Image (cartoon, grey):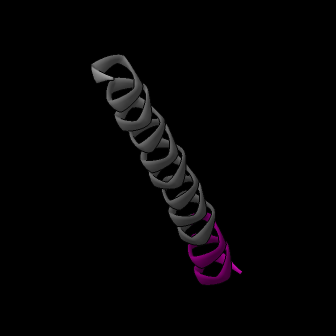
Amino acid sequence: MSLNIKSKVLEKKKKKEMLVRRLDLLLQQNKKLQTDRKES
């Protein structure tokens, strides 16, 4: 039982990390776009 709960928690963590990473990537791309616009 506890093993099952642990794996579920781990899965949630993984999903959260993936979401955070995706958000981070989006933010970086956004910054790049903004700097590109300023330069041109």
Q: Is residue 5 left or right of residue 34?
A: left
- At x 35%, y 17%, the residue is 3
Bounds of the magenta segment = 32-40
Outermost residue toward the top? 3
Which quarter of the rendering shows the C terminus? bottom right
26 lies left or right of 3: right
Q: Nearer the viewer, residue 38 or 31?
A: 31
Towards the viewer: 2 or 11: 2
Q: Split into 4 quadrants, where in the image is the N terminus?
A: top left
Pick the front one: 33 or 5 = 5
For residue 26, side relative to residue 16 (left or right) = right
What's the magenta bit mostly, secondary-structure-wise? helix
Q: Is 8 within the magenta?
A: no
The count of marks equals: 0
Residue at 51% of width from left, 65% of height from top? 27
Picture coordinates of residue 32, whole percent (x, y) = 61, 64
**Residue visible at 51% across and 61% down in the picture:** 23
Q: Which of the two residues, 31 or 23, is positioned nearer the viewer here?
A: 23
Query: Residue 38: percent from the left, percent from the top?
Result: 58, 82
**Residue 13 to residue 39: above or below:** above
Residue extending farthest to the front is 1
Residue at the limit of the structure toward the left, as seen here? 2
The answer to which quarter of the image holds residue 35 is: bottom right
Q: Residue at x 33, y 25 (%)?
A: 6
Return the residue found at the far right: 40
